[in-house]
Image (cartoon, rainbow, N blue to C red):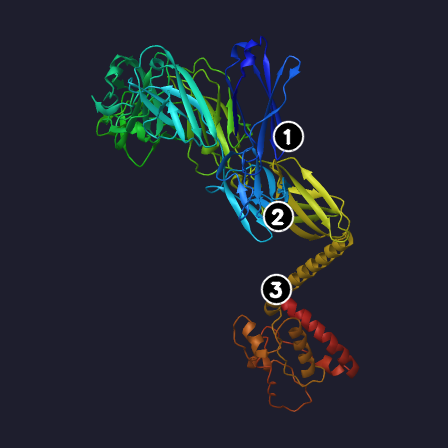
C-alpha cells in the first residue's frame, strides 16, 4: 500500500476556493492509476494524506507517485516523489507477495523476479489448473500472474511456484474467508450478566461491547452487566487475517430472560390418580417473576400440561392412570414478553398406586338356543393391577333368580344356553386385588323368526369399511358395529359409536384380506340392542388362484357340451364372484368361443352348436379383480351317427343278454319238468320182431337226454327224485304173451341199461295176433309211430298217475 502525505505551501493561504491535488501512480515508468484530492479553503495549509494499494507487490517493480495541483483553470507542473525501491537483482527466482492473506473471491497478482541470465518458464498455484496460468512480462527480469482465488487453502497455505529453465522457487499464500457472523441475539439467564450468541464461522478475534470475551467459546460470549429495565445496543465485532465483521442487537434484557431449568424435582402426595411435583430455583430473583411451566408426562404416549404462577415451583397432576409408571420433566419461562423456554429438567420416574379395574366393554353373539357373552380383554391402562378373574351374572327379565359363573383370566367369553325367545339381563365384572370393576350390563333381545334384516353388499376401501346409517332417537348410548368372517369360526369384533355419529370406519388393522365379512349395526339403549342393518363384503379382494373349480365334468347333447362343477364354498372365494366364463379352444384351428353367466350361484355352463372337433374347455370366475381361478378339461365332440350306432349296439347287447338269461332260466326249468314228467322208459322183454328193438329204445333214451337230461346214466338216476332204480317185476314179465309156435324158453336177461333205466308204470302189452299179421315194413313204420306213441302214452300215463 502506498501512503503519501504533504502540506500546502505558504502561498496557498490566500486561496478562497477549493484546491484540487492530482496524483498519478507509475509502475515501471508506466501510469497505472490517477486520483484527485479536493481541499476546502479552511483546510488549506494543513497536512493532507492519501493512500492507495497497488495490485502488484512493491518488490516486483518500481513504484512512483507524481503530485500536481489545480486551482480554477491553473495547473501546476508535476512534482515527482521519490521512487520506492524494488528487487532488482535476485539470486534465485523470487515470488511476491510472500505469506500474504487473501480473501476467497478476490483477484491477486503474483510476480516472479528472475536472476540474471535465467529464462522464465511458467508460474502456477497449487490446486489451480495450469491452463489458466498466463503470466505477462513486466520487465526483462519480472513476470506477473493474476489469479481469481476461488477456493480456500486446504492446508495452512497455498503454494505459488515460479519456474525457470534451471530453478524453481515460490511463496506461500493464505487464502480464506473473512469472519462469517450472523444472527446475533443477546439475553440473560442469571439477571446479572448478558449472554450473546451468534452463528459463527472463521473469526479469530471477537469483542463484545469493545471488550474481548473472557472465555473463547465458539458462538457465545458472556459479560457481567447490570440488568435492568430498558433497551440497550449490544455490539459484537469479529475479525481475522482476511477481514472484519460487525453485528449489533438492541434488546431489553428483562424481556429476554432465558431461565435455568428447575432443579431437584420430586414427587409428593402420591395416590392412584394424582401426584404433586415440587422443584427449586438456582436464581433467587426467579421467585419474583411471573412464570409459566410445562410438565411433560410420558406414559407410553406423551402429554404436556402448562401451569402458571409467580415464582411457580409446585404443581398437582390429576387424572393419572392407577398402577402406572410415569416419567416427568419440567421446563419454565417468563409469562410477560415470553422469550424462550428453559432446558428440560432431569427426568423423574414415579408409579401411581393401584385401583379397581375399569368397566369392561361387553357385547354378545346370538345363535340358536345359545347366547355367548363376550368382552374385550382389559388393556394395561384399564386393569389397574393384575386381573384375577371375571364374574358373569344373568337373570331373566321376568324373574328375580340370579345365576352366577366365574370365568378364568384366560377366557373372555361365556356361552349361555338360554331361551332365546326371552330377554335376559347379563352383567360382567373384572376383579383384581383392589376389588371389582363397575358392572357392565347388556340385555339380550328375544328372537322373532319373522323379523329379518336382509344383508346388502358393501365394497371395502383402503383395506377397511366405511359404514353409515340413519339416526335413531332411541339410541341413547349410541351404536354398536360388529363384524366377523362369514365362513369359519371367526371371532366377533366390535366398536362403539357415540349417539351423535351415524358413520364409522373399520380400519384395515382389524381385517384380513381375502375374507368375506358380515357387518351389523345395532342401536344401543337401556333395553336390548336393535339390529338396524346388515352388510357383507371384502375389505380387500384378492385374486383367486387357479384350480378353484373341483371335479369338472362334461356332458354332450348332440352338438352341445355342458361343463359342470361342484359349488364353490365361500371359504375358497377370496374375492366376490360375479359370474363365470367358459372358453372353448378348438385344437384344430385355435378358434376360441366364449360363453358366460352372471349368476354367482351357477354350477354349469353350456357351449352350444359346436362343430365336431377336440376342445379344451376352461372355466374361470369373474371377480372385481378380473377373471381368475381357471380350471380346464379336454373334450372330444362325437358326431350324432356315432351316438346312433352306439345306441343300436347297446340295444343289441341288451336284447342278447336278456335272451341268454331267458334261455338259461328255461333250460333249468325244462330239466326239472322232464325229470318229473318223463322218467326213463325200460326196454320191454320181447322176442317178436314187431317189438321195438334195443336200438329204438336207445333212440328214445337219446331223445330224452338231448332234451336236457345228462348223458350219464348215473347222473340221470341221481336226478330222479333220489329214488333207486326198480327192476321189472316177475309177474309183469310173466304176463307178457309168448308166441304159440315158439318153444318155451327161459326168460331172456335184460340188457345192462334196463336195470338202470326202468319205468314201473309203463307195461307195454302187444297182442299176439297183431304181431303176427304185421309185415316188415309195417313194423318199421309202427316202430317209428310206436316211439311217438310211447312218448305220448308216457305223458298220458304220467298225467293220469299224477
Q: Nearer the viewer, residue 711 or 192?
A: 192
Q: Position of residue 787 (x, y in %)?
A: 70, 75
Q: Earlier in the sequence, mark 1 or mark 3?
A: 1
Q: Nearer the viewer, residue 129 or 407?
A: 129
Q: Position of residue 334 (x, y in %)?
A: 33, 15
Q: Position of residue 273 (x, y in %)?
A: 26, 22
Whole-Å distance between the Cαs marked 1 and 2?
25 Å
Instruction: Tell me if residue 699 comes above or below residue 190 in the rendering.
Output: below
Name the residue at the front extreme: 11
Looking at the rendered image, the disc whose residue lies closer to the viewer, 3 or 2, is 2
Badge 1 local density, few (<14 within 10 Å), some, or many (20+)?
A: some
Can residue 85 be seen here? The reply is: yes
Name the residue at the top extreme: 16
Task: Residue 120: give its label.
Answer: 2
Q: Quadrant of the C terminus?
A: bottom right
Q: Position of residue 52 (x, y in %)?
A: 55, 27
Q: Which residue is mark 1?
A: 31
- Point 63% across, 90% down: residue: 744
Badge 3 local density, few (<14 within 10 Å), some, or many (20+)?
A: few
Q: Which residue is mark 3?
A: 669
Give SS at disc 3: helix
Q: Earlier in the sequence, mark 1 or mark 2?
A: 1
Q: Is residue 359 left or right of residue 461?
A: left
- Point 44% across, 32% down: residue: 202
Q: Are marks 1 and 2 in contact (CB under 8 Å)?
A: no
Amino acid at each position: 500500500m502506498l501512503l503519501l502525505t504533504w502540506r500546502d505551501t505558504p502561498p496557498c493561504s490566500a486561496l478562497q476556493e477549493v484546491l484540487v491535488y492530482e496524483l498519478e501512480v507509475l509502475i515501471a515508468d508506466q501510469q497505472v492509476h490517477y486520483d484527485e484530492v479536493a481541499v476546502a479553503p479552511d483546510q488549506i495549509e494543513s497536512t493532507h494524506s492519501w493512500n492507495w494499494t497497488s495490485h502488484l507487490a512493491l518488490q516486483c517493480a518500481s513504484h512512483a507517485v507524481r503530485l500536481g495541483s489545480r486551482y480554477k483553470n491553473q495547473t501546476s507542473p508535476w512534482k515527482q516523489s521519490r521512487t520506492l525501491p524494488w528487487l532488482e537483482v535476485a539470486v534465485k527466482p523470487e515470488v511476491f507477495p510472500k505469506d500474504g492473506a487473501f480473501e476467497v473471491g478476490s483477484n491477486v497478482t503474483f510476480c516472479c523476479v528472475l536472476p540474471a541470465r535465467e529464462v522464465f518458464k511458467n508460474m502456477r498455484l497449487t490446486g489451480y489448473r495450469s491452463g489458466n496460468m498466463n503470466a505477462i512480462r513486466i520487465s526483462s527480469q519480472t513476470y506477473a500472474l493474476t489469479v481469481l482465488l476461488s477456493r480456500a487453502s486446504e492446508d495452512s497455505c497455498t503454494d505459488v511456484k515460479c519456474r525457470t529453465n534451471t530453478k524453481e522457487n515460490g511463496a506461500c499464500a493464505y487464502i480464506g474467508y473473512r469472519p462469517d457472523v450472523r444472527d446475533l441475539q443477546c439475553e440473560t439467564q442469571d439477571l446479572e450478566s448478558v449472554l450473546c450468541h451468534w452463528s459463527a464461522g472463521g473469526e479469530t478475534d471477537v469483542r463484545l461491547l469493545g471488550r474481548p470475551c473472557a472465555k473463547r467459546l465458539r458462538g457465545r460470549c458472556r459479560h457481567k452487566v447490570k440488568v435492568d429495565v430498558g433497551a440497550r445496543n449490544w455490539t459484537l465485532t469479529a475479525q481475522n487475517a482476511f477481514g472484519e465483521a460487525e453485528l449489533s442487537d438492541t434488546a431489553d434484557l428483562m424481556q429476554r430472560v432465558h431461565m435455568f431449568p428447575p432443579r431437584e424435582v420430586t414427587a409428593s402426595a402420591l395416590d392412584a390418580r394424582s401426584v404433586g411435583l415440587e422443584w427449586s430455583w438456582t436464581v433467587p430473583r426467579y421467585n419474583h417473576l411471573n412464570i409459566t411451566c410445562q410438565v411433560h408426562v410420558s406414559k407410553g404416549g406423551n402429554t404436556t400440561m402448562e401451569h402458571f404462577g409467580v415464582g411457580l415451583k409446585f404443581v398437582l397432576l390429576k387424572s393419572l392412570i392407577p398402577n402406572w409408571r410415569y416419567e416427568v420433566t419440567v421446563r419454565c419461562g417468563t409469562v410477560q414478553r415470553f422469550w424462550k423456554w428453559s432446558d428440560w429438567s432431569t427426568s423423574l420416574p414415579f408409579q401411581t398406586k393401584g385401583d379397581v379395574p375399569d368397566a369392561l366393554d361387553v357385547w354378545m353373539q346370538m345363535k340358536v338356543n345359545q347366547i355367548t357373552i363376550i368382552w374385550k380383554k382389559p388393556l394395561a391402562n384399564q386393569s389397574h393391577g393384575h386381573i384375577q378373574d371375571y364374574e358373569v351374572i344373568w337373570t331373566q327379565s321376568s324373574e328375580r333368580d340370579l345365576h352366577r359363573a366365574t370365568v378364568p383370566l384366560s377366557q373372555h367369553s361365556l356361552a349361555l344356553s338360554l331361551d332365546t325367545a326371552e330377554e335376559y339381563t347379563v352383567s360382567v365384572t373384572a376383579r383384581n386385588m383392589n376389588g371389582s370393576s363397575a358392572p357392565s350390563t347388556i340385555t339380550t333381545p328375544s328372537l322373532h323368526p319373522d323379523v329379518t334384516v336382509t344383508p346388502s353388499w358393501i365394497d371395502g376401501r383402503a383395506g377397511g369399511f366405511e359404514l353409515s346409517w340413519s339416526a335413531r332417537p332411541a339410541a341413547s348410548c349410541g351404536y354398536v358395529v360388529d363384524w366377523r368372517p362369514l365362513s369359519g369360526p371367526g371371532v366377533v369384533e366390535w366398536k362403539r359409536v357415540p349417539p351423535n355419529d351415524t358413520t364409522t370406519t373399520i380400519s384395515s388393522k382389524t381385517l384380513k384380506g381375502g375374507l368375506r365379512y358380515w357387518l351389523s349395526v345395532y342401536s344401543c339403549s337401556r333395553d336390548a340392542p336393535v339390529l338396524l342393518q346388515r352388510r357383507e363384503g371384502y375389505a380387500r379382494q384378492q385374486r383367486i388362484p387357479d384350480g378353484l373349480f373341483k371335479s369338472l365334468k362334461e356332458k354332450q347333447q348332440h352338438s352341445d357340451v355342458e361343463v359342470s362343477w361342484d359349488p364353490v364354498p365361500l371359504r375358497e372365494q377370496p374375492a366376490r364372484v360375479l359370474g363365470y366364463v367358459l372358453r372353448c379352444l378348438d385344437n384344430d384351428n385355435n378358434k376360441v368361443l366364449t360363453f358366460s353367466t352372471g349368476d354367482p350361484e351357477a354350477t354349469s355352463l353350456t357351449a352350444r352348436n359346436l362343430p365336431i372337433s377336440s376342445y379344451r374347455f376352461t372355466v374361470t370366475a369373474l371377480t372385481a379383480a378380473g377373471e381368475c381361478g381357471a380350471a380346464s378339461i379336454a373334450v372330444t365332440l362325437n358326431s350324432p351317427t356315432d351316438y346312433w350306432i352306439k345306441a343300436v349296439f347297446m340295444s343289441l347287447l341288451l336284447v342278447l343278454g336278456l335272451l341268454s338269461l331267458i334261455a338259461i332260466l328255461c333250460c333249468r326249468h325244462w330239466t326239472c319238468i322232464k325229470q318229473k314228467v318223463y322218467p326213463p322208459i325200460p326196454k320191454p322183454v320181447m322176442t317178436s320182431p314187431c317189438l321195438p328193438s334195443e336200438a329204438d329204445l336207445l333212440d328214445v333214451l337219446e331223445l330224452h337226454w338231448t332234451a336236457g337230461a345228462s348223458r350219464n346214466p348215473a347222473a340221470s338216476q341221481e336226478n330222479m327224485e333220489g329214488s333207486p332204480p326198480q327192476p321189472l317185476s316177475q309177474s309183469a314179465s310173466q304176463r307178457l304173451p309168448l308166441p304159440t309156435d315158439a318153444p318155451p324158453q327161459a326168460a331172456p336177461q335184460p340188457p345192462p341199461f334196463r336195470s338202470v333205466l326202468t319205468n314201473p308204470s309203463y307195461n307195454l302189452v302187444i297182442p299176439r295176433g297183431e304181431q303176427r299179421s304185421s309185415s316188415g315194413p309195417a313194423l318199421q313204420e309202427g316202430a317209428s309211430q310206436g316211439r311217438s306213441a310211447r312218448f305220448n302214452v308216457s305223458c298220458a300215463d304220467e298225467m293220469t298217475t299224477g
